[in-house]
Amino acid sequence: MNTVFIVARKELIDLFRDRRTVLMGLLLMPILFPALILGAGSMAERKARTQLESTLELPVIGAEHAPNLIRFLRGQNIDAKPAPEDPDADVRAQTYDAVLRISPEFGERWRDSRSAEVELIYDSSRRDSQIPIARVRTAIEQYNRTLALLRSIDRGMSPEVLQPVRLARRDVATPESRRGTLLAFLPYLLILSSFLGGAYLVIDVTAGERERQSLEPLLATPAARAAIMSGKILAAICFGMLSLVLILAAFKISFAVAPGQMRLVHLSWQLLLQLLVVLLPMVLIGTTLLTLIAASVKSVKEAQSYMSVLMLLPIVPTVMLMVNPIKNQLWQFTVPFLAQNQLILRLVRSEIVTLAEWAVYLSTSFGLGLILWVLAARLYHRERLAISA
């Protein structure tokens, strides 16, 4: 253990001598990630507020057939505009968010108390038009309900006849669970930071020293090669955990001063500590895996080529859960990246993580790290490791 700490101390001292690299490694992510989440959240909130509060200009085909409907829409802050010649093409070209077509038989069917048809033309694949479309649909549904109510009263019928079943809604979501929906992308950022937080140091102390021909004298010392490798891994873990602490502190400060709904997100110190416990095994897995890769390649450039592939791994569970949400099950805590994703979301939502889930997660995660450590140690015992390419 003395050798491990000596090597770790030596690697950290060498790293902190390169101030530019340290500043980039420690300060870039704590600045970039909060700016990314808060900036995107603020832009989305500002755009949604603008779309909800501003006057919506809606092209209407056949507005003369339903003057009462047009007046009602105007009262809902929806202003009818002349219709384009080809509404389908203009909606696809994003010239208009939506176009309303009123049937020529609307007036006749309305006077006969029959259902009159209106058609809303929109593009469901455009996310930026969802709010305008929802405003138009809500206004027409409200007009429909109002008209049905007036017709029933005019015929001496109780309005309840038109509503045999009345649906009451009770949302049991807690503020903490709603808070979790605002941070759906947070697990990916934290997992990526922990998985590759010590990447530069890991690659440099193995593949880099091999290229500089400084690894051979170190391996020629009486110290055990496994202890030397463990010291390098320990140094990378310390650097990665320091980076995570700064990132989480930056998130806490950013959410405390964030505008709008982002202010609902409260990261307590207890939550931050729990997140560090969740991410510690991922730091171990990432550093041991990168050590294994760095010890098996011939150059730093070749080791860095694997980074593009490794960066995709943490996003797999995030995309999978977005496309196909699944309920929490115990086996999920044995799957790397998926386990961290589920745990982070549950902690942010203030949901209880059982002792069995903690035990399964920590045992399997540290077990995987141990397996990768053993494989990397075997490569460190190869004689050709000290020979530069």
Image (tube, rainbow, N blue to C red):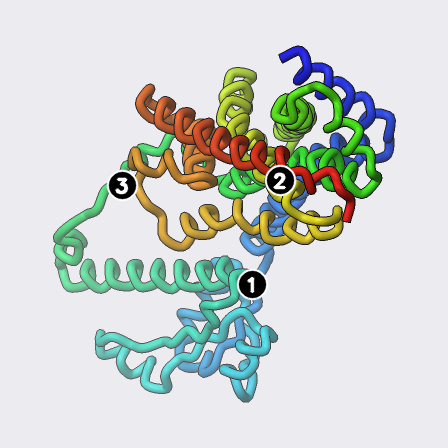
Q: Earlier in the sequence, mark 3 or mark 1?
A: 1
Q: Are marks 3 and 1 in contact (CB under 8 Å)?
A: no
Asked if residue 349 can be seen in this view, the reply is no
Q: Who is closer to the viewer here, 278 or 133?
A: 278
Q: Who is closer to the viewer here, 359 or 210?
A: 210
Residue 350 image point, x, y percent: 41, 25
Mark 3 Cα-neighbour bin, 10 Å: few <14, some 14–19, many ≥20: few
Q: Earlier in the sequence, mark 1 or mark 2?
A: 1
Residue at numbered disc 1:
56
Residue at numbered disc 3:
169
194 with respect to 217 (left or right): left
Q: Which residue is rendered at x = 38% and y = 76% of the image?
A: 119
Q: Who is closer to the viewer here, 76 or 340?
A: 340
Mark 1 Cα-neighbour bin, 10 Å: few <14, some 14–19, many ≥20: many
Which of the two marks, 3 or 1, is nearer to us in this view? 3
Q: Which residue type does callout 2 highlight?
A: Leu
What is the spatial separation of the Cα atoms under label 3 and label 1, in whole angstroms? 29 Å
Residue 183 image point, x, y percent: 52, 38
Give above or below for 68 relative to 326: below
Residue 338 image point, x, y percent: 43, 41
186 with respect to 332 (left or right): right
Which of the two marks, 2 or 3, is nearer to us in this view? 2
Q: Quadrant of residue 4?
A: top right
Assign a secondary structure to mark 1: strand
Q: Which residue type does callout 3 highlight?
A: Arg
Q: Quadrant of residue 105?
A: bottom left
